[in-house]
Image (cartoon, rainbow, N blue to C red):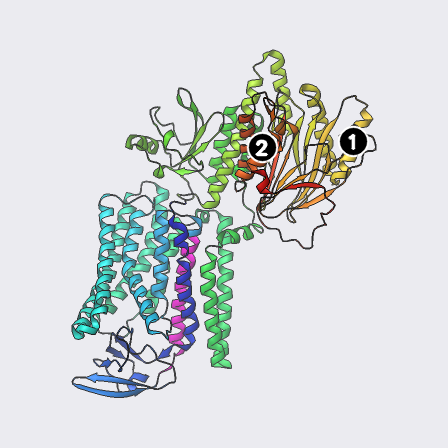
Amino acid sequence: MDRGNSSPLLSWLLVPVTAALVLSALSLPHQPYVGLVLRGDLVVAVVPGGPAEHAGLAPGDHLVPQPGQPTFTRSPLANVVPGVPMILLRERGQDVVAVRMVPRALPDGERRMMAALLAVASGFVLIGGWVWSERRDRLTRTFFLLCLAFAWFLAPLPRWRNEASGALYDAFYTGAGLYLPALFIHFFALFPESGQPRGRLRSITTVAYGVATGIFGASFLIMLAEPVFGAIAATAQTLIEGMAGLWFAFGLLGALYVFAGSYRRARSTDARRRLRVALAGTALGALPFATLVAVRNLSSGGPIPGERLAVILTLLVPASFAWATGVHRVFEFKVALRAAVSLVVLAALGALVYVTGEWLAAAWRRDLGSGLAGGALTFVALTAAVAGPATRWLRSLGARFIPDAATATERLGASPGARGGTPGHVVQTACQALADAFHLDGCLALEFAPGGLRTVACAGVTVSPPPETDFTAALPESGGIVALEDLHLRAPDRRALERAGVAWLLPVEGTVRHCLLLGRRLGGSWFGLEDQRELRRFAGHLEVLLENARLRQAASTHGSMGRELSKAGAIQARLLPRRVPAFRSLDCAAAALSSESVGGDYYDFVRSPGPVVTLAVGDAAGKGIPAALMGTWAHAAFRDRARRGAAPGELLSALNHELVALNQPQAFVALLCARVDVRAATFTFANAGLTPPLLRRRDGRFEELSQSGVLLGVAPRAHYEDLSVELDAGDIMVLYSDGLTEARRGEEEFGPEGVRRVLESHARKGATEILRALLAEVQAFTDQPLDDVTVVVLKQLTRPARARPAPCQEELKFQVQGADDTR
C-alpha cells in the first residue's frame, strides 16, 4: 500500500540505474582485454598468454600513474582501447621501467560472461520494478532498493572517457556493494509482515547501516587523502577493501540469521510455506556470492572455481522473494500464466537479437555482430526497466486473452440477496463476496450503532472483537482499505483485533456506517494497487445497496398496504439490473431511489455481442402505483427491443407507437435510450423528453446534450434522432431524471449547477464515488422529501484507439459552458 511521499522519488531511481545498464551494454563490444587482475595499482594476477604477460608484467608489480594523470582515476588502465598500444610505467622493486602493452578485444568467453552479468543485473531491475509497481510499503521499499543495488553492483563497468565521471561511478559502485548487506538485513528484519523492526531487530538494522556508512566514509576520506599521504593512503585503502569484503560476507550471513529467526517465528502453515521458498532461494543465491566476494577480497588474486555460477545464482534471491511476497496473484493460475507468458516473450526477443549478433560475429563480420549484441543487451536493460512500471498495462493486455474471474463488486451485484434483501442480507452477501473474490479466511461486518459496535454479518473464521475494542477514531477519513498494522491503536485494542483474526479494515460510509473486518489472505499477505481500487469501488457500491435496502425497509413499516407496496417495490427493484456493466476502459455506476414504496423511475442495461451495451433511463409521469406500472411497461418493452439490436431512435419510435396505441390518458414516459460502444468510446443516444444528459470533459468543459424529442405517448408519429458523442479518457457522462435537479431547499432548486459542482469536485474519482457524492449532496441540500431519482454515471478511463474518425458532431445541439463559468 502507498505510504509516505518517498514513493515517487524512489521510482525515479530506476533512471540512473537503467542509464548505467544501457551504458554498460553499449560499451560491452568495446571492452578491452589486458589479461591481468589489479587491486588498486598492484598486479595480483597475470593470465598466461595475455597482453600483460607479453608486455612483461608479473604478479607483485605496481603500475605507476603517468605524469599528469589525475590521482582519483579508478585504474591505471581506465583509458585502455582495444588494439591501441599504450605505455605503462612498471615498478618492480626499486626499478621503474616503461613497458608497451597492446590490449585486445574481449575473448568470446569473457564477452559472454559479461553479457550474462548484464542480463542478471537487468533481471534484478525487472523484478524490483515489478514488485514496486504492485505494492509500496516498508518491505517492498527495501526490496526495491536491494534489487537496484544488486543491479549496480553486478553490471560490468562501463567505459568512461571522463575521469571525473568514472570516479563518480566508482563511488556509487562502492556504496552499492557496502550497503547491500545492510539492505539484506533490513529486508529480512521486515519480512514477511512489513512492520517496523522492533527491539533487537531494530538494533541490528541500525548497526548494519552504521557499519556500511562508516566503511564508505573511510574509503571516501582515504581517496581524498591519497595525494597527500601516498603510500600510507594506499595501505589504508587495501585494509579498507579487506574490511569491506569481510563485511559483505558476514553481513549476508547475519541477514540469513535474521531470516531464519523470522522462519522460526512464523505461526501459520501458509506463512511457513512462503518463507520456505524465500529461505531456499536466499541460501542458494546469497551464500555462494558472499563466499566469492570474501575470498576475492582476501586472496592474492587469480580465478576462483565456480565464480561465474555464483554470480548468476544471485538472481535466485529476488526471484524467490518475488514469488513469496510480490504479486499475490502468482498463486492464481490464470494471472501466473499471463505473467509467465509476458516475461518469456520479452526474454525471447532479447535472446533472439543477441544470438543473431553472435552468429554474425562468428560467420560474417565481428564488428557488426558485436555491435548488434550490444544493442540486444541494451534492449534487455531498457525492457527490464520499463516492464516493472508497465505491469498494469501488461496485465490488462494479458486479460484480453485470459480473462480474470469475477470481481468482488461483480459478485455483489449479481447476488439477489444484495439487490432486494434487507440491510442484513446485503451485508452478509458482501462479506461472502469479499471472502470469495480475495481468498480471505474470514470477513466480519460491524455496524456503528448508537450504543456501540454491533456485529451484523460474518463469513469464515474471523470472530467478533470484544465490545470494548475501540478503533473507530483511528480509521482514515479518506476511506479505503487500511492494514491493521497501520492504525494508531492502543496496545489492548490491537491485540484484541489480532486475536479476532483481523488483518485489514474497510470502512463503508452511508446513513449508517459499517466497517468490514477482513481476515488474512490465503494467496498473499497484502493487497496490490489494483485490489485497493476494486475495494474502494466495492465499498461505494455496497453503500448504495445498503441505502436502497434501508429505504425499502422503512417503506415496509406503513401498515398492510405499506407491506404490499413494499413487496411490489422489491419486485420492482429486482427488475433493475443485478449488476452494473464492468469494463476496463469504462467505469459505470447507477442507482434509482423512489420517493414511495414503488415509483416510476428506472434504469436498465442490456449487453450486446462484443463490448457494446444499450442503456435506458426512464421517468414515468406521476408517482406511486400508476407511475410504477408505466415504468414496468417501459422496462419490459425496452429490453425486448434492445435485445433485437434496435438503434436508440428506432427503439424509442417503436415504444412511442405502442404507448399511443394503449390509448391511456396521461400515460406519458420520459425515456432516454443510448448505445455505448465501449471499444470505440462512442455514446449514441436518442431522447424522449428526459432531462438532458450532462457531459464533463477532461479539460473541465461541460456539455449539456439538449437534443430531445417529445415524451413517449404524446404524438403518434413522433420521430427521435440518433446522435453520437465521442468520449475520451477522463470524460464523465451523467444521465439523470428530473428528481435530482428539481430537489428544493425553500425556493432554491438543486439544478444542473449542483450536478456540475459535484462533478467538478469529484472529477478524479471513480463512477461509484461520483454517484455516491451526487446522492449525498442532493440529500444534504433538500429540506423537502425527494421525488423519484435515477442517476447513471459513466466515466471513460482510457483513451480509445478508433479505427476511423467518429461521425461529425457539428449537428449536435448542446450548451457548452467552461469550467470557469461553473465556479
| Disc 2 packing (10 Å; few <14; some 14–19; many ≥20) | some
State whether residue 49 appears in this view. no
Which residues fall within the magenta stretch? 103-131
Residue at 25 percent across and 69 percent down: it is: 296
Residue receiving disc 2:
754
Q: Position of residue 673 (x, y in %)?
A: 70, 36
Q: CA distance from mark 2 to mark 1?
A: 32 Å
Q: Position of residue 511 (x, y in %)?
A: 49, 25
Q: Would you place residue 307 above or below residue 747 in this image?
A: below
Residue receiving disc 1:
656
Q: Position of residue 165 (x, y in %)?
A: 35, 70
Relative depth, front residue between 339 and 781: 781
Q: Would you place residue 267 above or below residue 358 in this image?
A: above
- Asked if the magenta segment contains residue 124, the reply would be yes
| Residue at disc 2, secondary structure | helix
Residue at 56 percent across and 30 percent down: it is: 775
Relative depth, front residue between 67 and 367: 67
